[in-house]
Image: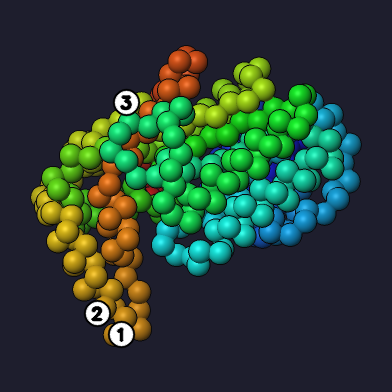
Amino acid sequence: MRTVFLFGGSGYIGRFIINRFLELDLFDSYFIFDLNSPQWFDKLPEKVTFIQGDVREQIPNIDIQANPKETWVFNLAAIHREPGHLEHEYYETNIEGAKNICDFADRKGILNIFFTSSIAPYGMTKEIKTEESELNPVTPYGVSKKEAEKIHISWKNSNANRRLIIVRPSVIYGPNDPGNVYRMIKALKKGIFILPDGGKIVKAYGYIYGLVDSVIFTMGKKDPEIIYNYAEYPLMDLKEMTLSIKKEFKYKKPTLSLPTFLLVFVAYLLQLIFKLFGKKSDFHPARVKKASFPTNIKPEYLIKSGFVFKYDLPKSLNHWRSEAPGDFQ
């Protein structure tokens, strides 16, 4: 019996992974373990079981009959929005969750874990980052993901028969996702997007369908341990991204450029003004600083392994529009 457990499987990445697995008929049974049920299913497929639970607590003893060598655990559960949570919340979900999920795999004799980490453990640097680069996180989220990686590696090293794959995704975007790339597209349409310092910075991005392709690609390898970055290759700088988006969607409004320090100052002012009216502004100083700093991530493992990157930015935008035209109406 080929079985897969997807902890945090009701989230954005989980949605596309499980749908692709179902299309390819990779497993005989699917368990989604999450606080919330998967909303994209009108009705759960026969092979799919939803279990409501919290990874911050010990995972219950789910009764299954599965081949340990063909069974996979996916740890997709995370708190990631920065800023947006208290410091201890990142540690409780990302670190304690990792411990509980690895403990579950240990108790059930499961030999394969796939963990979605982040590029946040690399920290802030203008240098190109590969999988061999030093990890130097500077935020609670980045620290928690680095520690979670250690927990999974310790689990793998305690048994020579175990396999572990860790992916460090860059900013992921695609259909029905209201994330950074989509917000940039909407801002460019309205003519309110501002390039920090002329946009000569590289911001790593990854299309959701390409990420899922990489998941299946690495699962098909035989390496007992794989740690890899996911970002499209080659990348564009922020100015090139805006030009590509405007060309794809035929947006004509101009795009302004301002120094980062001025954008941060404006963000502080907006925070104060919104606070006076009891509201919150998404234009947060911390996000402005984050958006203005490069994340030049190179997916070296995938490049050397012969992975085919099918979705550069123009192709991904075209594919996105064909998959979810309502996102752009």
Label of residue 327 in the image: none
Mark identifier at residue 234: 3
Give the left or right position of residue 154, taking residue 267 as reference.
Answer: right
Q: Secondary structure at mark 2?
A: helix
Give residue 51's position: percent from left, percent from top: 75, 54
Residue pointed to by mark 1: 277
Dot 2 amino acid type? Ile
Specify whether 145 is left or right of 52.
Answer: left
Q: Residues within 10 Å of mark 3 (few under 14, many from 20)?
A: few
Local SS, label 3: loop
Classify residue 266 by image quadrant.
bottom left
Q: CA distance from mark 1 to mark 2?
A: 7 Å
Residue position marked by numbered label 2 in the rendering: 273
Residue 207 or residue 219, whichever sits in front: 219
* Count of all numbered marks drawn on residues in the image: 3
Disc 2 from disc 3: Cα separation: 40 Å
Q: Amino acid at mark 1?
A: Phe
Q: Residue at x 56, y 64 (%)?
A: 88
Q: Residue at x 42, y 31 (%)?
A: 133
Disc 1 is placed on an element classified as loop
Asked if the residue at tag 2 contacts the one at tag 1, i.e. Cβ–Cβ closer than 8 Å, the answer is: yes
Q: CA distance from mark 1 to mark 3?
A: 44 Å
- Is 97 left, or right, of 16 in this rendering? right
Q: Which residue is at a point 62% across and 60% down the rendered structure image?
A: 92
From this view, report whether residue 121 is shown above or below residue 162.
below
Examine the rendering and report whether any part of residue 119 can be seen: no
Q: What amino acid is found at the position of numbered circle 3 in the picture? A: Pro
